[in-house]
Amino acid sequence: MQHNPAQTTHAAHHPEKKGILNWISRWIFTTNHKDIGTLYLCLSGLMFFIAGMMAMLIRAQLIHPGTHFFDPNFYNSLVTLHGLIMIFGVIMPAFVGLGNWMIPLMIGAPDMALPRLNNWSFWILPFAFSILTSTLFMEGGGPNFGWTMYAPLSTTFAPPSTDFVVISIHLMGLSSILGAINIIATILNLRAPGMTLMKMPLFVWTWLITAFLLIMAMPVLAGAVTMILFDRHFGTSFFNAAGGGDPLLYQHVFWFFAHPEVYIMILPGFGIISSIIPTFSRKPLFGYTSMVLAVASIAFLSFIVWAHHMFVTGIALGAQIFFMYTTMLIAVPTGVKVFNWTATMFRGSLTFETPMLFALAFVVLFTIGGFSGLMLAMVPADYQYEDTYFVVAHFHYVLVTGALFTIFAGIYYWLPKWTGHYYNEFLGKLHFWLTVIAVNLTFFPMHFLGLTGMPRRVADYALQYTEFNFLASLGAFLLGAAQLIFLYNIIMTIRGGKKATAQVWEGAHGLEWTVPSPAPYHTFAEPPVIN
């Protein structure tokens, strides 16, 4: 594919006005997709360290039975906020940041379709997360019912801070919906001449499908938390059996949102891996069309599997069988993707820079998470696994190695394009190896804890679980320490280093690799023509 890149140089970079007030106003009022992508990534990084500190505190409490750094109620608040912040404050903003930065570059667009909406959708988030994190310090304690916010815990027995959690979730959802509208409008309207839908990079495809998932799923969460608010303050009984409601209704509504949400946090990662593996294999992606169809299939199936989270709630046997088989069916398009990534590497000229290492770790470890997901999909087996640490192990293998590893891979892959400097490869690989060792040390023992019956969301445990919990806590502290290397490497890369070429990586193809590094502030003043 021949490109005719816009004749833009780094001299066309943004005009820098002197003075701290000008600098602040530039970042507050910016409508440039690169600035807003950077803001999303910075917010995600900040929330990553806040939620990570909560994880450290959780694992400190569990390092030994009888360890009581804080009371069980505060422990439950930490567990709740760790989950909410990691999902809504780390994974989702990071993917939106990567999408903001890269989608216009990949499709030859001058900017996002709705730049002012883009600015607004970001600036909602700092207020949302300020409200959410402040609940930890409110009178009556922070939210203590888990990130799923199950009724009647969240309606009848929850502290007053619950109302602020609901408000913050509404704000996050609004931001996500606005961002999704912007991404759909950009991809459908601003592609370069000659770039048909089936010529788009897979990262763009995965974000297009994810954006539709967001628009369909987020209003459902808004409905669920609004019903919590009404049950708490306006005398309704949506989830109160005494008033004619049903607590299980909450679970149905919540999981109808939350299962597509899992794929909202995974699909853009699939797109990142589908960019990285061909680059470092020096081969085109194997089975492009089947990859697009697989992503679309996963998105569709994600809406008809929600009750596999509810096998122990007494739902009808016919419903259990339906949800068991539809859940297992998701393994088929996921298997197609794993096969295609493997086939892309087969007989390729592989090199193992940091982005490729994270991509390989993702393929292996995410597959392990997929296998434990199949175990949880089987109704009779799920009766044993439900609400044990086996579930904790499963979703961390899916989300840490599935979402977080792909974000790390994407940042290392595109960082030279953003900054104009190559990062320190030694520090990148050190970060990778420490992270992979720590993730497995933290979460693999949890499978055995769950299989032997340790319940999740408990602040203390029986003596027989001591050794595995000690290993998990050790791994968690190592995982936290390893991220400081990542932060240091990014800061040093922004400050300077070996100059990056326009292509950055030998074997990289696509419009984003035809513009200078760092990418000019205004890219593609004239749309490139794709022959």
Image (cartoon, rainbow, N blue to C red):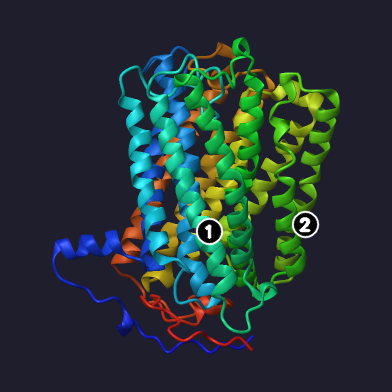
Name the residue type under label 1. Answer: Ile
Depicted 12 relative to depicted 301: above or below:
below
Locate residue 314 relative to residue 130 in the image: left or right. right
Residue 354 makes an appearance in the image: no
Helix, strand or loop at mark 2: helix
Depicted 273 relative to depicted 350: above or below:
above
Name the residue type under label 2. Answer: Val
Label 1: which residue?
181
Tell me the crowding category of disc 2: few under 14, some 14 to 19, or many 20 or more residues within 10 angstroms, Cα based.
Answer: some
Q: Nearer the viewer, residue 307 or 277?
A: 307
Instruction: Find the distance from the CA under tag 1 to the CA under tag 2.
Output: 29 Å
Q: Position of residue 418 (x, y in %)?
A: 40, 69
Depicted 353 relative to depicted 326: above or below:
below
Label 2: which residue?
336
Dividing the image into 4 quarters, which one contains the N terminus? bottom right
Locate residue 510 relative to residue 312 in the image: left or right. left
Locate residue 230 relative to residue 444 in the image: left or right. left
Q: Position of residue 367 (x, y in %)?
A: 70, 47
Picture residue at 67% right of the left edge, 30% below the top: 252
Residue 393 makes an appearance in the image: yes
Q: Nearer the viewer, residue 260 or 439?
A: 260
